[in-house]
Amino acid sequence: MLRVTQSETSGGSGYVRRTLRPEAFAYGQSMLGLGRTVGAALRQRLTPDHASAWTLAAPDVPEVDINAYRGRVGTALRVPWSAYVAVIDNERRRRGTTFVVPDAMVLTAELEHYPLDTEVLTVGDEVLYVVRPGQAGTEAAWDQAGSAAGEMALLTAAPVPSSGATSDDLQRLADAAVFVVVSAYDTTTKAIFFEFASV
């Protein structure tokens, strides 16, 4: 289980893990297309039978607000993005896992036109940003993949190739995912974590 404490979120400001209703999985499924091959590989696992869904919020935020998925979702939560990054980084350190962010828009042939601040893995025309165990750069990788459609990422326990990756490698990353995180472009105050029961 992902460990969330005040010190791991936003300096003791009181954000806690809030469990979401099963409807969150329909939203999560709708966001998997942003992950292209990795997203498709996650589709069968991203269900209430295999995962739990949660976000961060103050304890007094009404349940109706944390379970809203349309419009400016998360406005009432007002959780800084750094709080979500802290959760991801804590899990990366604790588990020795790798953060992988597929880019929903950029193609391999277009990379030369983009300044890059993180390691890049390409598979065919697909681009993924990688932050390995012991490395900094979680927020930079997430920002690199930002698009008007939103984005998704995963934390995986599988070895991530540095080059020559194939679609089979992406399947292995998905099979060994510890959690998936999604956020829409206009909801940077809300990210949803889908945490898998086992890897």
Image (cartoon, grey):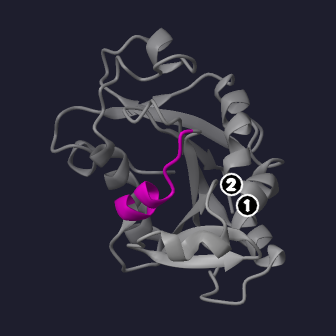
- Viewed as shown, does residue 185 lie left or right of 17? right
Q: Secondary structure of the magenta portion, mostly?
A: helix
Please identify the quarter of the rendering in which residue 149 is found.
top right
Give the image location of residue 142, x and y in percent.
Answer: 45, 57
Give the image location of residue 52, x and y in percent.
Answer: 62, 38
Which element type, helix, strand or loop, lies under badge 2? Answer: helix
Q: Residue at x 51, y 51 (%)?
A: 1
Q: Amino acid at mark 1?
A: Val
- Viewed as shown, does residue 85 lie left or right of 44? left
Q: Amino acid at mark 2?
A: Gly
Q: Residue at x 59, y 47 (%)?
A: 195
**Whether residue 143 can be seen here:** yes
Q: Which residues are magenta?
A: 139-148
- Viewed as shown, does residue 24 lie left or right of 187? right
Checking the image for residue 38, the label placed there is 1
Which element type, helix, strand or loop, lies under badge 1? Answer: helix
Q: In the rendered image of this protein, does residue 157 appear above or below residue 29? A: below
Q: Which residue is mark 2?
A: 35
Q: 54 or 37, which lies in front?
A: 37
Q: 12 or 71, which lies in front?
A: 71
Disc 1 to disc 2: CB gap under 8 Å: yes
* Image quadrant occupied by the C terminus: bottom right
Give the image location of residue 17, x and y in percent.
Answer: 41, 35
Residue 25 magenta-highlighted: no
Please identify the quarter of the rendering in which residue 23 is found.
top right
> Going by the picture, which residue comes out furthest to the front?
113
